[in-house]
Image: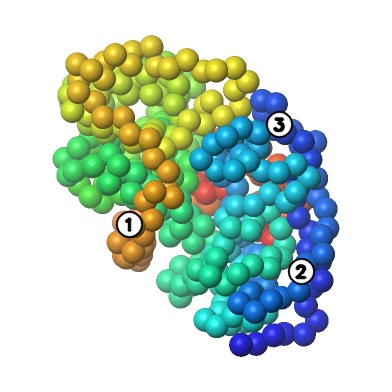
Amino acid sequence: MSVTTALPSSSREIRLASRPVGRPVPENFRLEESPLPELQDGQILVRNLYISVDPYMRGRMNDVKSYSAPFALDAALDGGAIGEVIASRAEGRKVGDAVVHQLGWREFAVLDADATSVARTDLAPASAFLGALGMTGLTAYAGLLKVAEFKPGDAVFVSGAAGAVGSLVGQIAKAMGASRVIGSAGTAEKVARLLELGFDAAFNYNDGPVRDQLVQAAGPAGIDVYFDNVGGDHLEAALAVLNVGGRVAMCGAIAQYNSTEPTPAPRNLALAIGKQLTLRGFLVSGQRQHSAEFFGTMSAWLAEGSVRYDETVVDGLENAPQAFMDLLDGANTGKMLVRL
């Protein structure tokens, strides 16, 4: 056990100043400074290097019951982060270790060592443990292979395909023997990037009706798996194009996160009956049992270059709220991170 000298006594943090109505605005956030508690036995002090901003955080800004507790008003936000241990009173965590934890949105964090995991930064840069080798990667891997029950030869459609999860889903499908992988994204640049990453086809959902573009991209063979990050018109389009026995992994519905009115279900949901479709919602927290399998497989894919990942990095804790708002507007390619 070791403790360093001249440790910080306070930390800047981003607090939720008010609950957003519709799209978040800067006034919903506030930068404050808080004293750090004294380190207790079993605890470590971490200097955060990167924090993750993720679409699911929008739901936690509402005061509604959900799978994850809402953020408290006038309290620091939290979420995925990776940082360096700068003081330790815990066995198994030493100064200099890189650890992944859930006290993001702040510069320094005091937390129980058993609420952290050590990142193998000899295998990949620290930031990858919030993305391709972290929760993001597990979401893509388990969602495609375990939830959607992908099998070699399947044709796969991924919405939000240039995002952190979607870009990995498409590459995993290719690595596992998909017959065809199709992605949707919101700009011509993102579409071009998907093709560089090995997608067989990609389209800009702003160029025309999603259904028409998906029909053209899929061709007469249709699709067998839809990995849904968007919801709305994308889910409706996929239902129309899915083959009999098709599977949908419902990961997110970013098109609806800022909605202030209830959003209608797909108008063609009854197609699921005749086509004998399976629609399964999932949370990454329910897929932890696949973590070891995922980590070993993804590490190998990254090492051999069959899977690549993109990052959009914003510098400075004070810019974290804007990074989050930009994320909801689709400004990122790959994982959106804030570097401290």
Q: Where in the figure is residue 91, as x and y percent of width and height? A: 55, 83
x 57%, y 48%: residue: 336
Q: Name the residue nearer the viewer: 289 or 56.
A: 289
Dot label at residue 37: 2
Closer mark to the observer between disc 1 and disc 2: 2
Dot label at residue 20: 3
* C-alpha span from label 2 to label 3: 30 Å
Q: How is the image coloured?
A: rainbow
Q: Is residue 3 above or below residue 157?
A: below
Left or right: where 26 falls relative to 217? right
Crowdedness near tag 3: few (<14), some (14–19) or many (≥20) residues, C-alpha within 10 Å: some
Query: Which amino acid type is marked by label 2?
Result: Pro
Contact, mark 1 vs mark 2 (Cβ under 8 Å): no
The kind of secondary structure element at disc 1 is: helix
* C-alpha span from label 3 to label 1: 35 Å
Q: Name the residue nearer the viewer: 3 or 299.
A: 3
Q: Where in the figure is residue 210, as x and y percent of width and height? A: 40, 20
**Residue identified by numbered label 1:** 290
Along the polypeptide, which appears first: circle 2 or circle 3?
3
Query: Which amino acid type is marked by label 1?
Result: His
Closer mark to the observer between disc 2 and disc 3: 2
Dot label at residue 40: none
Report whether residue 260 is seen.
yes
Quadrant that contains the C terminus: bottom right
* C-alpha span from label 1 to label 2: 35 Å
